[in-house]
Structure formats: C-alpha cells, structure tokens
Image (cartoon, rainbow, N blue to C red):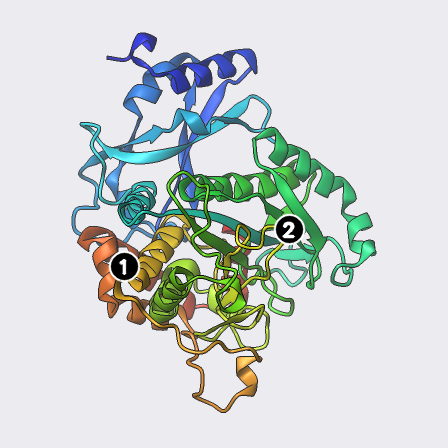
Amino acid sequence: MTGPHRLDAAALRAIERADTEGVELVRFLYADHGGVIRGKAASRPRLAERIHTGIGHTVAMMAMNMLDELQDVEGLGPVGEVRIVPDPATFVHLPYAPGAAAMLSDLRRVDGSPWPLCPRTFLREAVAALAAEGHALVAAYEPEFTLGRREPDPAGGLDRLVPADDSLCYSTVGFNQLHDYTMALVRALESQGLRPEHYHPELGNGQHELSIHHAPALQAADNHVIYRETVRGVAARMSMWASLAPKPLADQPGNGAHLHVSLWDPELKTNAFGDPEGRYGMSATAYRFIGGLVAHLPALTALTCGSVNSFRRLTPRSWSSAYACYGMDNREAAVRICSPTGRDAAASANLELKPSDSSANPYLSLGAVIHAGLDGIRRDLDPGDPVNVDPATLPSGRVPRLPASLDEALDALEADDVLMNALGPLRASAYLAVKRSEARSFAAQDAAYELFHHFRVF
C-alpha cells in the first residue's frame, strides 16, 4: 500500500516539510563501495509513495567503481533489483540546491527485507553487535577539504584544481580570504541540523577544516554524508570547487577525515572509556578497544582509507599517521588518546583514528572500526606500550608501517578473518572487486589522471 495513512510520524513530517518548504525533488542518497555518494530523486507528488516503496535500482551499482567501471561480481549484473528506501528521520532541505531536499537511504530487497550489500545496514548491524555487549558508540568525523577553482590545463591536459588561497596554517589571512564561503557553509550545515564546532585554515593551500558535533554512530555517518554534500554544494553555488579527496594536489598536504570515537552505556550517560585512575585517564575497556584497533589496523585501512589516492596521503611525517601504534596526543600514531576537555575529564575521554579520509564509505568505515574494537574487548587484547614519539624517528621495524598502497591494504583485509566475516561473503567479494579494479585502473595511468579523478569525485 502507498497511501499516506500507512506512513509513520517521521514520514508524515518529511512530507509536510516538503510541502511547506517548496521542495520539488527529494534525493534518496546512499554511499557505494567506491565511496561515491549516489542516489535518485523522487518528485514531490510521488514522495509519499516512494517513501513507502523506495525507488527501483539495479543491483549492479554496488559493483561499480569510482570511474563508473562495472566489475564482474556474481549476482551483481544486469538482472536483479533493489530499492533505495529513504529514512524520513534524516530529511534535510538542501540550502545549496533550491527546491531540493535529501534523505539518507537503505538499499532493500523488493520485499522490503535488508539487502546484504546495504552499507547503512552494515553499520546498523555493527551497532547492534556492540549493544549486545552493553555499549553504544558515539563518533564524529573531523574532515579537511581543499577549496579552489577547477580550471582547464593550459597545456591541454585534464582540468586542474587551483587553490583559492595560499595562506599559512591557522593564519588569519586564510580566515579572511575565505570568510564568505566559510560563513555560507556554517549556515548551510546548521540549517540541516549539523552543529559546527571548530573551524580553521589548514596547512595546505586552499585547505580548510571544519568539524561538527559528535553523534551516535549511525547518525555520525549520516552526518558525514550530508557534510560532504554540503561542502561541495556550497562551493558550487559560489562558482568554486571543493574537494575532500585525500590528496587532490600532489605538492600540498592531504585531506583527512579523522574519526573520534568513545563508548558509552546504552542510555549515553556514562563514558566507558573514562577512568580517572587509569593511565592517561582511560579505562581498561578503552585499552582493549585500542588493542582491537591496533591488531586490525592494516586491514582497517582498506576501509577507512578507501582509495588509491588515500595512500598518496598516508606517508610518514605527513601528519597522517602511517604507523600501526597508539600514543597520548601523538599525531603521528594511528590511534591517538586525546587529552580531556572541560571539567568532566571522564566524560570527554575519546580516541582519534587518524588514518581515515573522506574517500571511504563512512558506513563501512565506522562499522569496521566497531568490529575491530569489539574484537579487542571480547578477546581482552593488550595494545602494548604507547608510542609517544614520532614513530619515524625509531629504528626501522620497531613500529609496524601501515600499508603503503591500496593493494597492500586489500591484501591485509583479505587475510583478516574478523573483518571479512563481519563484511560477509557477498559484500566482501564486491568491495574487493571494486577496489582492486580501481588500483588496476589508476596504475595504468599517470599521477595527473589519478589526482583529477579523485578531486572530481570526492
């Protein structure tokens, strides 16, 4: 049935908002295995029906890589249908696209049951597994992006991304040069229910960072999709080009999307990571979670640093944390124990996963982080001693280096039983096929080709 009387309160509110806010098209968005945000849009007159039924979609799209090259994955060809089914609770009006709104969506079978390749379902299931152990995860991405203009190459090659400023890191010159864009971005995020926390010009030319408030895991991933869309959408409305690609410019610092996480009780009242008596104010549970992250870091990078371009950024002494270790406020360690903030140190206890960027599918990335940390809790994994110096200054081999390429990371993922089992056979097969194909395609081209396609897509 498609009548509005069958819709729940959230759906009815979304329909009412579409009416009162002059929405004509509503985008149903999802993230694919290539890390690309894709979707289809429903017209306002069909919105009630499509919230209920979803929009038809070929199964093949989850075998498509970021170059729109379809991979040969059994069951993901021209035969078969899924539905893009929106979550009405995520309805947002798009301030950078007048007349349009969006909802984050699940991919479901025609009968409405969960589809094994739905990334949002993967994260939801990871959250449920964590809840079974008495925990809820709160997270926030801390993304960087490069703002500039897309211009033709004078030599006739692919378009170039020309940075919008050349200011110094944290420089007030950078604040002033991009003030109009920054304020437009802040207002656009706030109008969609995201809460900006900190902003500053970053180290690279045209590079900026704006972080938003933390949220429960699924909402945090949803927020990151909205954030990515808004950063780029606001830039486009102002005749600029924004890229969250890990390394859009070869000679400039790369863009991370550092992931902050903490564990709480199911009611989100008590932070399970905080312990005033523990080393660095962290609990035994926190250290077991760290143990899981460190144990699975090589495989995790295939999901948290999801592109060929990621590994151009993930190098020693580049503030990207290229070593499998943890430390207290060590920004060259993959896992950073963060200093407490505010009066309640225990409540603010959190970890930062630094090898993380916006070319990753945030649902797969965050879900994999949960599974890795949960494995550490279940097996009481000891993370070893913290590394509180730059790992690159230590003798070679003292601290394991993270994978140096996407292929190396995928090899580690294939060898990691915990993460492969969590992904499941069909999702793991499709993800590996898509990512292996991207590695092959970019290996056959020059660096300019790689940089162009990443700053264009992400």
Q: Is residue 369 toward the left or the right of residue 427 in the image?
A: right
Q: Where the N terminus falls, by quadrant?
A: top left
The x, y position of residue 183, in whole percent, is 73, 38
Residue drawn 53% across the image and 24% down it: 100
The x, y position of residue 91, in whole percent, is 47, 26
Question: Of the residues shown, which amino acid type is indicated by label 2?
Answer: Gly
- Which mark, by number, is residue 1? none
Q: Which of labels 2 and 1 is toward the front?
A: 2
Give the residue pinned by disc 2: 342
Mark 2, Cα crowd under 10 Å, few <14 / some 14-19 / many 20+, is: few
- Which mark, by number, is residue 433? 1
Q: Quadrant of residue 440?
A: bottom left
SS at badge 2: loop
Compared to residue 42, the image places residue 227 above or below, namely: below
Q: Earlier in the sequence, mark 2 or mark 1?
A: 2
Q: Is residue 358 toward the left or the right of residue 86 in the image?
A: right
Mark 1, Cα crowd under 10 Å, few <14 / some 14-19 / many 20+, is: many
